[in-house]
Image (cartoon, rainbow, N blue to C red):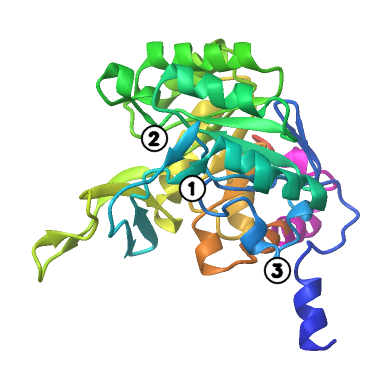
Amino acid sequence: MDERNEQKAARTPRATSMSLAVNLGGLDMRNPVTTASGTFAAGREYHDFVDVASLGAVTTKGVSLHGWEGNASPRIAEVPSGMLNSIGLQNPGVAHLKEHELPWLAEVGATTIVNVSGHSFDEYVSVIEALEDAPVDAYEVNISCPNVDAGGMTMGCHVPSVEKVVSLCRAATARPLIVKLTPNVTDVTEIARAAEAAGADAISLINTLLGMAIDARRRRPQLARVVGGFSGPAVKPVALRMVWQCHNAVKVPILGMGGVTTGTDAVEFMLAGATAVAVGTANFMNPRATVDVIDGIIDYCEEQGVSDVNELIGALQC
């Protein structure tokens, strides 16, 4: 096989007789791997490396009603076993997503999850309402946004705010509603139960941990906003713990993420209780990371005699 054909073959997961399909709160996925919001754009940039239609789903970068400029630079810093980002949810707005990205995803046959962001309760609802006539398979509601109506407090840190935003979004759509939780709380299970009670079909976690990096020689922070979201392999133990806790606290399925780089990482999340996983920071290091993770899941299942990937969900023996 010449190099060009080898690269083309690497764009899709390898063939297997085992069943990879999962159902995430009403969303049918051909395999349990999607992308973490903000690490894959809407898939177009990665399509030369990965056939996005072969993934369980593509999760878009967070979209707001109108465009957001994002934070000042520098806003990305590499740290040991991970990265910090303070992008600030920069995006061109929901109209651009509808006109340019969603039609393309539909054309190539991808399953699409749109990550919804907002600075107020009304904005979340308005974004969903704007997308109801678009080719969208599910919504992921990012409740880690600061709520301008509450003095900038993060919505996902306060049970009443979680209940309100999720219930409003639930009333706005019949499509599967995935609620993305922040790990920067005292008790993540309390937030998970609030999201479930308000109508979430599934929950996703974890969003990034709050961290910072310092340039000792300059005696200055490496990010313009000082702190940012910490992601990558180093956060996996925290993410696994929170997925396991939530699996034991709620009945809705879980989309697990946080340091997923290999198929074994994905299997660990599923054993802890996740129905599906999202690959995030690994996409920056390896543009074929998503397909490599799917292949790794297949390798594990075939080695272990697992005929259906659903057998792994919550199978951790404690």
Quadrant in the rendering for residue 8: bottom right
Real-space Cα separation, disc 2 to disc 3, in angstroms: 33 Å
Quadrant in the rendering for residue 274: top right
**Left or right of residue 186: residue 232:** right
Q: Are the residues at dot 1 and dot 2 in contact (C-beta closer than 8 Å)?
A: yes
Q: Position of residue 73 (x, y in %)?
A: 28, 58
Does 298 lie within the magenta span?
Answer: yes
Q: Nearer the viewer, mark 1 or mark 3?
A: 3
Task: Specify the principal SS of the magenta part.
Answer: helix
For the magenta stretch, what is the residue range? 295-312
**Left or right of residue 72: residue 293:** right
Real-space Cα separation, disc 1 to disc 3, in angstroms: 25 Å
Q: Is residue 254 above or below residue 193?
A: below
Earlier-in-chain disc, 2 versus 3: 3
Amino acid carrying label 2: it is Pro
Earlier-in-chain disc, 1 versus 3: 3
Give the residue at x 12% y 67%.
216
Of helix, strand and loop, which one carries label 2? loop
Specify few, some or many for label 2: CA neighbours under 10 Å numbering under 14, 14-19, or 20 or more.
many
> Which sits in the foreground, 290 or 118?
118
Q: Which mark is residue 48?
A: 3
Q: Position of residue 315 (x, y in %)?
A: 66, 37
Of helix, strand and loop, which one carries label 1? loop
Residue receiving disc 2: 183
Any part of residue 318 in sight: no
Specify few, some or many for label 1: CA neighbours under 10 Å numbering under 14, 14-19, or 20 or more.
many
Amino acid carrying label 1: it is Gly
Give the residue at x 24% y 21%.
151
Q: Is residue 117 above or below residue 211?
A: above
Q: Which mark is residue 258?
A: 1
> Which sits in the foreground, 58 or 131?
131
Of helix, strand and loop, which one carries label 3? loop
